[in-house]
Image: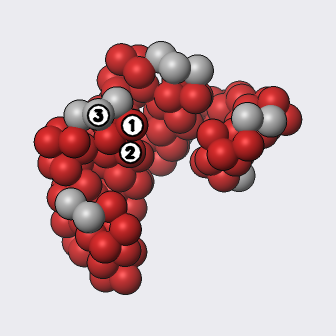
């Protein structure tokens, strides 16, 4: 719900979506405090999305990196892939296509590792890394 809300906020600029995304951050923060090994990467990813939406690109990039590290450390390959993909989109939006391409390649590899070949193919086709 949180990622979808932030995606809709990017697409529509409607404040209700940002508010819903922020509410999701509050909820997942509660879970992350009790079980960081299961939820920390999700919290960091949502925080990155919030920062991206707010135009805080340096903060967003750091949060994506932290989400990637947490997902890697705790074995959540799907969250690692998603964070790489979203960081690639951030970098691409900033005009940093070379670094974005690296992130998309890492997302592609992580999706393959997770067993999501169609998603990996979609990243490769849609993003064109």
Distance, label 3 to label 2, CA atoms, is 10 Å
Distance, label 1 to label 3, CA atoms, is 5 Å
Image spot of residue 6 (x, y percent): 65, 41
The structure residue drawn at horizontal position 53% and vertical position 34%, both measured from the top left corner, is 49
Location of the C terminus by quadrant is: bottom left
* Residue positioned most to the right: 16
Indicate the quadrant where residue 93 lies. top left
**What kind of element bears circle 1?**
helix
Q: How many marks?
A: 3
Instruction: Compare marks 3 and 2 and give the one earlier in the sequence.
Output: 2
**What kind of element bears circle 3?**
loop
29 and 104: which one is in front? 104
**What kind of element bears circle 2?**
helix
* Residue positioned most to the front: 95
Image spot of residue 98 (x, y percent): 14, 42
Q: Looking at the image, do the residues carrying marks 3 and 2 touch, with CB atoms under 8 Å apart?
A: no
Q: Is residue 83 visible?
A: no
Query: Does 93 appear above or below 128?
Result: above
| Image disc number at residue 24 | none
The residue at which mark 2 appears reads as: 89
Q: Nearer the viewer, mark 3 or mark 2?
A: 3
Image spot of residue 71 (x, y percent): 34, 47
């Amino acid at each position: 719900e949180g990622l979808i809300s932030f995606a809709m906020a990017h697409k529509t600029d409607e404040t209700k979506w940002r508010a819903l995304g922020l509410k999701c951050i509050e909820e997942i923060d509660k879970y992350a405090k009790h079980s960081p090994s299961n939820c920390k990467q999700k919290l960091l990813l949502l925080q990155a999305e919030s920062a991206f939406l707010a135009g805080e690109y340096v903060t967003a990039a750091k949060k994506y990196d932290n989400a990637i590290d947490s997902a890697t450390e705790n074995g959540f390959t799907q969250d690692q892939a998603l964070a790489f993909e979203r960081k690639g989109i951030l970098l691409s939006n900033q005009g940093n296509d070379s670094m974005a391409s690296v992130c998309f390649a890492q997302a592609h590899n992580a999706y393959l590792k997770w067993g999501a070949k169609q998603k990996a193919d979609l990243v490769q086709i849609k993003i064109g890394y």
